[in-house]
Image (spheres, grey):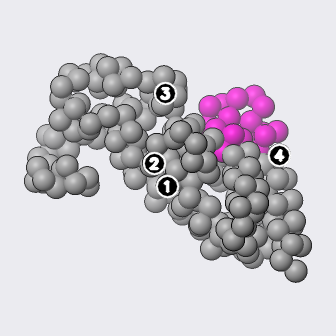
């Protein structure tokens, strides 16, 4: 719950329902047309409410996005925790990538989160934090990701791997014909990254 809501006191059932509707509507729009292309006006209209009502719950799109991230962060964390460790086989990595893709499709995770979660360039703070949580979570499962956190070069390599993973998962969630090939590439990049980082630490 945001500090804004704490100041206003607990949400009434009606306000909680409206807030949830706004988030669900925004998530659909973010998923279908992207976060940048989606306007507050579109969210309000699609949710069947007024812009002024939306602003009583959220100050801007980024605040809505932060709430959406909070909603599925737990599910993503559970997928990350399923990563076999400490040295997964290629088959295990491919199965893990598939699990991640299926979660993204089921939860309609906005593409921006998957594509830029490991970056800090012109993205909302919540998106950056989401990417960091995946990076750190993988570091707790895989020595390669843990070791990568200790140098700028390691972080850059890990971010590149995570962006490839995000791209593949986003394509799968969107039903793209090339998704399966990209998922295979994501598994391959993960495997190579793990192998190379482990070689560097020996």
Q: Is residue 38 above or below residue 132?
A: above
Circles 2 and 1 in contact, beta carbons < 8 Å: yes
Lateral position of residue 52 relative to residue 169, left or right? left
Q: Which residue is mark 2?
A: 125
Could you tell which of marks 2 and 4 lies nearer the N-terminus? 2
Rendering coords of residue 108 (x, y %): 51, 39
Q: Secondary structure at mark 4?
A: helix
Query: Disc 2 and disc 1: Cα gap in Å?
Result: 6 Å
How far, Cα to Cα, is label 3 from label 2? 15 Å
Task: Tell me the CA gap for discs 4 and 3.
Answer: 27 Å
Q: Residue at x 29, y 24 (%)?
A: 44
* Element at label 3: loop
Question: Eyeballing the image, is 180 above or below 190?
Answer: above
**Contact between labelled residues 3 and 4, with CB atoms less than 8 Å apart:** no
State the quadrant of the C terminus. bottom right
Mark 2: secondary structure: helix
10 Å crowding of disc 4: few (<14), some (14-19), many (20+): some
């Amino acid at each position: 719950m945001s500090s804004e809501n704490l100041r206003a006191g607990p949400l009434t059932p009606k306000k909680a329902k409206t807030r949830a509707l706004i988030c669900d509507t925004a998530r659909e729009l973010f998923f279908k047309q992207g976060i940048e292309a989606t306007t507050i006006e579109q969210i309000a209209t699609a949710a069947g409410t007024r812009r002024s009502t939306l602003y009583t719950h959220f100050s801007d799109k980024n605040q809505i996005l932060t709430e959406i991230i909070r909603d599925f962060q737990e599910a993503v964390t559970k997928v990350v925790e399923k990563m076999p460790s400490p040295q997964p086989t290629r088959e295990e990595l491919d199965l893990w990538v598939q699990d991640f893709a299926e979660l993204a499709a089921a939860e309609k995770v906005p593409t921006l989160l998957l594509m830029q979660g490991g970056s800090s360039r012109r993205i909302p703070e919540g998106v950056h934090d989401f990417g960091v949580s995946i990076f750190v979570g993988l570091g707790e499962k895989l020595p390669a990701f843990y070791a990568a956190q200790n140098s700028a070069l390691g972080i850059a390599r890990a971010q590149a791997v995570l962006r490839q993973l995000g791209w593949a998962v986003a394509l799968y969630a969107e039903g793209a014909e090339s998704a399966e090939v990209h998922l295979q590439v994501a598994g391959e990049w993960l495997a190579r990254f793990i192998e190379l980082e482990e070689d560097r630490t020996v």
